[in-house]
Image (cartoon, rainbow, N blue to C red):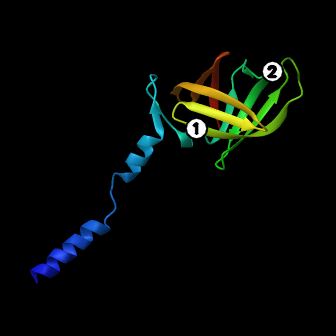
Amino acid sequence: MTKLLFTLFALILVSCECPYQDELNRAQQRKTNIAGDVFYADVLLGTWQCYYPMVIGGVEFKQILFMSDGRADITMDKPNDTEWYTETYNYAYYGNTLRFSRSGSNISLTIEGYLFPELYLRDSFGHYTLAKRK
């Protein structure tokens, strides 16, 4: 009887999931910024408006739509132009870096901070702000 109870108890312990595993997984994907808010990779999903001016690589970014499949539709135009167009980029989020790639061109932006609904970015040419939109 004792062996049966011991085996049953061991089986229960082994079959239980760790209640903290979700928190451990999230901790690996988040970055706490000086501003105090916590930024998760999932926060990127959706539409972000680019504050003026956000000129990168000779084009002005207007808005970015991040999708769950690792792609982002970036609406942009030539500076001082009124014709907007959208191009699809692949994106990746690594710790404090956001990278866009398309046809051999790469854009790398460093995340400086996050204070909902704004995300603060920078590259070697300037500082930029994105705002989450519904």
Q: Tell me the SS state at disc 2.
A: loop
Measuring 64% from the left and 34% from the top, which residue is drawn there?
Answer: 99
Q: Type of residue at label 1?
A: Tyr
Quadrant of image for the N terminus: bottom left
| Residue annotated with mark 1 | 93
- Left or right: where 23 falls relative to 95: left
Measuring 21% from the left and 76% from the top, which residue is drawn there?
Answer: 8
Instruction: Tell me residue 54's x, y (percent).
Output: 72, 21
Residue that protrudes farthest toward the front in the picture = 104
Measuring 52% from the left and 27% from the top, which residue is drawn there?
Answer: 114
**Where, by quadrant of the figure, is residue 2 drawn?**
bottom left
Q: Is residue 106 above or below residue 58?
A: below
Instruction: Tell me residue 19's x, y (percent).
Output: 33, 55
CB under 8 Å between discs 1 and 2? no
Q: Type of residue at label 2?
A: Gly
Instruction: Tell me residue 26's x, y (percent).
Output: 44, 45
Q: Tell me the SS state at disc 1.
A: strand
| Residue annotated with mark 2 | 58
Badge 2: few (under 14), some or many (20 or more) residues near its Cα, within 10 Å? Answer: few
Tally the marks: 2
Say which label, 1 or 2, has the lower sequence index.
Answer: 2
Return the residue nearer the eye: 118 or 94.
94
Instruction: Tell me residue 59's x, y (percent).
Output: 80, 23
Measuring 21% from the left and 71% from the top, which residue is drawn there?
Answer: 10
Marks 1 and 2 sit apart, C-alpha to C-alpha, by 23 Å
Badge 1: few (under 14), some or many (20 or more) residues near its Cα, within 10 Å? Answer: some
**Where, by quadrant of the figure, is residue 49 drawn?**
top right
